[in-house]
Amino acid sequence: MFRSLLRLVWKTTPFKFYGPTSFGCRLSSQFLQMSENQRKFTICVEGNIGAGKSHMLDYFKHEPGVEIYSEPIKKWRNVHGINVLDLMYQDPRRWGLTFQTYVQLTMFQTHIQKIDHPVKLMERSIFSAKYVFVENLYKSGMMQDVEYHILTEWFNQIVKDIHVDLIVYLRTSPETALKRIQKRNRIEEQNIPLDYLKSLHELHDDWLVNGRCKIPAEVMTLDANKGIDEMIEIFQTRRNKILCQ
Ligand code: TTP
Ligand code: MG
């Protein structure tokens, strides 16, 4: 009776064709493939200019299964030879729309980029470009109504298919952000005043803390005023949650 039951189980099990040595391997690689096909995670790192987003991406760059997407700042500095990031800082009223249109496009390209690994970890998102930077240009009178509305219509059209699983908000004081910006000394950012960073800080908070604009995913807020060693400890402790594992 017991033997015939065993025979029945052996006959009906879907793994009966796998030899005993290859069974585990084939099974686990099948599961890996299945889970890779089924579920990918996108994590966006947000925070003021100089908050430490690039450092955080750097920390996770050797994690297996994680693809890092740093901000396409190189592209913004070289649009057929023209540094449109610099133009925007020189004359935001004239070049704000041009620059933000390009940021929106390049962010969109990163969002829709297919990945081979389970996790996409990206610096910023199309959302902060819109809810923080575009909003700031508009409310400070640097962007005309019609410019803002056209950019918003584009944004609403293209974000429909974008999915984000987690936002990590590296929250710093504007003063900390300014110190770091001055230290790294990016040429275009040399004249950024504290008030500009205060305004960006408020817009980040309005969006990610107060929920004034649509938040596309769960938010993990980290106090990023700390030094690099302490930040690394925090990344270590929160590793699994940050990588959606
Ligand atoms: P950030 O996107 O804040 O990147 P970062 O490298 O300065 O941040 P971190 O130090 O945390 O790594 O800004 C990059 C530059 O682009 C900065 O000068 C601000 C500018 N910018 C805009 O003006 N508009 C935008 O929509 C975005 C995304 C950036
Ligand atoms: Mg950066």
Image (cartoon, helix red, strand yellow):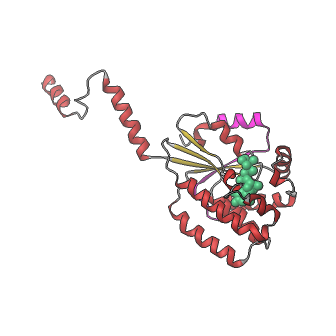
> Left or right of 151: which side holds 180?
right
Q: Taking 31 as reference, is 83 above or below it?
A: below
Q: Where in the figure is residue 226, as x and y percent of width and height?
A: 79, 40
Q: Position of residue 33 (x, y in %)?
A: 39, 39
Q: In this view, does 154 lie above or below 225?
A: below
Q: Is residue 211 visible to us here?
A: no
Tell me the residue at 71%/35% (across/down): 232
Residue at screen point 63% across, 71% down: 152
Q: Residue farthest to the top? A: 21
Near-viewer residue (164 or 184): 184
* Stretch in magenta: 212-238
Q: Residue furthest bottom?
A: 146
Residue 29 located within the stretch drawn in magenta: no
Q: Kindly identify the residue that appears in the image at 36 percent across and 27 percent down.
A: 25
Residue 140: image quadrant is bottom right
Left or right of residue 176: residue 241: left
| Nearest the eye: 90 or 159 | 90
Q: Is there any visible trace of residue 125 in the rendered image?
A: yes
In depth, the one of 3 and 99 nearer the eye is: 99
Residue in the image at 77% along x and 36% along y: 228
Counting from the top left corner in percent of width and height, residue 45 is at: 65, 49
Which quadrant of the figure contains the N terminus? top left
Spot occupied by residue 148 in the image (x, y as percentages of width and height):
68, 73
Q: Count how many numbered circles sit on residues in the image.
A: 0
The image quadrant that residue 150 belongs to is bottom right
